[in-house]
Image (cartoon, grey):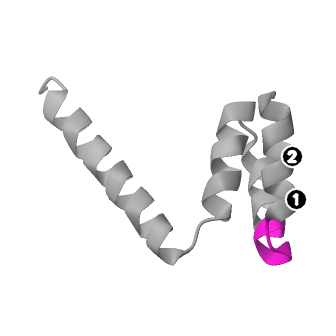
Amino acid sequence: MKLTDLLQDVREQLPEARGKMYEELIEKYGGSETFQFTLALVAGCNGRERRLIRMLIAEVDLRESDNSPTI
């Protein structure tokens, strides 16, 4: 199965309001097909899942900043 097919399947499952928010973000900012797929998955997440995603992003940002050279 191709990413295009997976993206279409996920988009079709989004509730109307979330689908609209997703489409507006893609229209405004664009992004690769992989990024669009990621946004569609996040748009379909519940509150707990989104909190876990935010925790992951915060941890990644923290670790990346720890590894960055100081100026």
Q: Main secondary structure of the magenta part?
A: helix
Amino acid found under the numbered disc labelled 2: Gln
- The quadrant of the rendering that contains the N terminus is top right
Q: Residue at x 39, y 62 (%)?
A: 52
Residue 19 falls in image quadrant: bottom right
For label 2, the residue is 8
Circle 2/circle 1 CB separation < 8 Å: yes
Q: Position of residue 43 (x, y in %)?
A: 66, 63
Q: Position of residue 30 (x, y in %)?
A: 76, 40
Can the viewer see residue 58 in this picture?
yes
What element does badge 2 sit on? helix
Q: Position of residue 12 (x, y in %)?
A: 88, 59
Amino acid found under the numbered disc labelled 1: Glu
Q: Is residue 10 above or below residue 19?
A: above
Q: Residue at x 77, y 49 (%)?
A: 26
What element does badge 1 sit on? helix
Q: Which residues are magenta?
A: 14-20
Residue 18 falls in image quadrant: bottom right
Can the viewer see residue 32 in this picture?
no
For label 1, the residue is 12
Q: Give the number of callouts.
A: 2
- The quadrant of the rendering that contains the C terminus is top left
> For mark 2, does the 10 Å Cα neighbourhood hold few (<14), some (14 to 19), or many (20 or more) residues?
few
What distance separates the C-alpha of mark 2 from that of mark 1? 6 Å
Q: Residue at x 57, y 73 (%)?
A: 46
Q: Residue at x 65, y 54 (%)?
A: 41
Q: Position of residue 21 (x, y in %)?
A: 76, 67
Q: Is residue 16 magenta?
A: yes
